[in-house]
Image: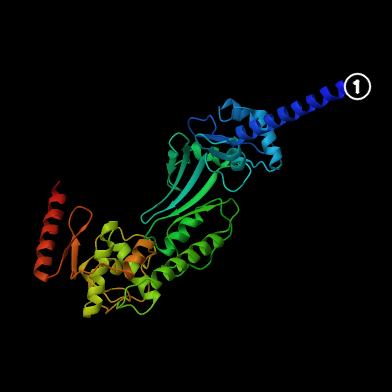
Amino acid sequence: MWRHIASNFLTFLVVLVFLVGGVILWGQSEYTAQGPLDEPICLRVERGSNMRAVSRELEQEGAISNGTIFRVGVDYANKNSLLKAGSWLIPEGASMSEISDIITRGGASTCGTEVVYRIGVTDAEIEVRELDPATNRYVEKAAFVPGEGDVPEAFETVREKADTRYRIAVAEGVTSWQVMQGLAAVDVLEGEVNETPPEGSLAPDSYEVREGDTRASVIERMRQAQDLILAEAWEERQEGLPLDSPYEALILASIIEKETGVAEERGQVASVFVNRLNRGMRLQTDPTVIYGITEGQGVLGRGLRRSELRAETPWNTYVIDGLPPTPIANPGRASIEAAVNPLSTDYIFFVADGTGGHAFAITLDEHNRNVARWREIEAQRATD
């Protein structure tokens, strides 16, 4: 009898082990399988929250099929205590395993609201925008110029949120003085920078910052980025360029940056200046004259006068030979690469063509015809 009871009990244990093993395998499969979410969501995790509360919200949003399996899986992966506050983008079809990684890895929030401080060539702007999880694109909520008019309520509201992201977007072609002025208006930064960085030394780009970062640390990031871009470009430069150093390449790149806003033209504009340098011709470019007047401190805001084209300044390339002594702005990567790898052309002239681009010419006669067409366009616009 006891032998029969022992045999049945052993059979029960075997069956129980198989059942438990099957449940574990099923749970593991559910934890790593594609999730039910049919479109992305932005999951907000409040400070002081826990995995139980998060799992309930994920269930309500339809992001996971079973909150218990999610919590067990997180606990098994030793991530239960690693939950990070913030706003996290949960992509379509994310598995429980992927979601647990997203909400525990830390770093800056990946969705929600973002404040962008834009430092542009003509003005500065603050933009409040929010990520739409369905399209994974930011939607503008408010935009304003610092010091002009009332501050939008949307800006005041997001400043109170702990998970709001902050970004500084520096446009290509801004001067170092403009960067300094722009950073002074970024109210989440601390500290002062007493000396304007050398012209051309700052890389135009988008930089994420945290509240309490120093202005000096942001400047240093920009300088390091520009040093790296310039070094890489110089290493890959064409042979036979009329440039003796990376710094001269930076000067030329800044002129290219200010001469055209059309990306496809950079190589052609670069070729004109390289051809002129090779022939010993003066560069004769208006942006250098403007820099000689403003020295990068603000925008001229009007056309050049004939007297200014003849005025002697270190940057007036109608008067001086070769390159000016310093860059005239902070060029972006594309202009730096164009300076050291220009297109191979015979162009030595260009003038605006009325479309936002330029008409290029090899001979002076051809250039004069292009100039005459541009004058006609200007005259027509003046009467419209």
User: Which of these two is toward me, 151 or 41?
Assistant: 41
Q: Is residue 193 left or right of residue 118?
A: right
Q: Is residue 15 above or below residue 79?
A: above
Measuring from the top left, give residue 146's x and y in whole percent: 45, 48
**Amino acid at pointer 1:** Trp
If the image is split into quadrants, where does the N terminus sit? top right
Specify whether residue 318 is in view.
no
Q: Residue at x 12, y 70 (%)?
A: 363
Looking at the rendering, which quadrant does residue 104 occupy?
Answer: top right
Q: Is residue 74 left or right of residue 219?
A: right
Q: Is residue 356 left or right of residue 59?
A: left
Q: How is the image coloured?
A: rainbow
Under tag 1, what secondary structure? helix
Looking at the rendering, which quadrant does residue 53 occupy?
Answer: top right
Mark 1, residue position:
2
Q: Is residue 130 above or below residue 218?
A: above
Q: Is residue 8 above or below residue 239?
A: above
* Label 1 CA crowd tier, 10 Å (few <14, some 14–19, many 20+): few
Q: Residue at x 43, y 71 (%)?
A: 231
Q: Residue at x 39, y 72 (%)?
A: 234
Measuring from the top left, give residue 357's x and y in whole percent: 22, 56
Q: Is residue 134 left or right of residue 295?
A: right
Task: Tell me how many marks there are.
Answer: 1
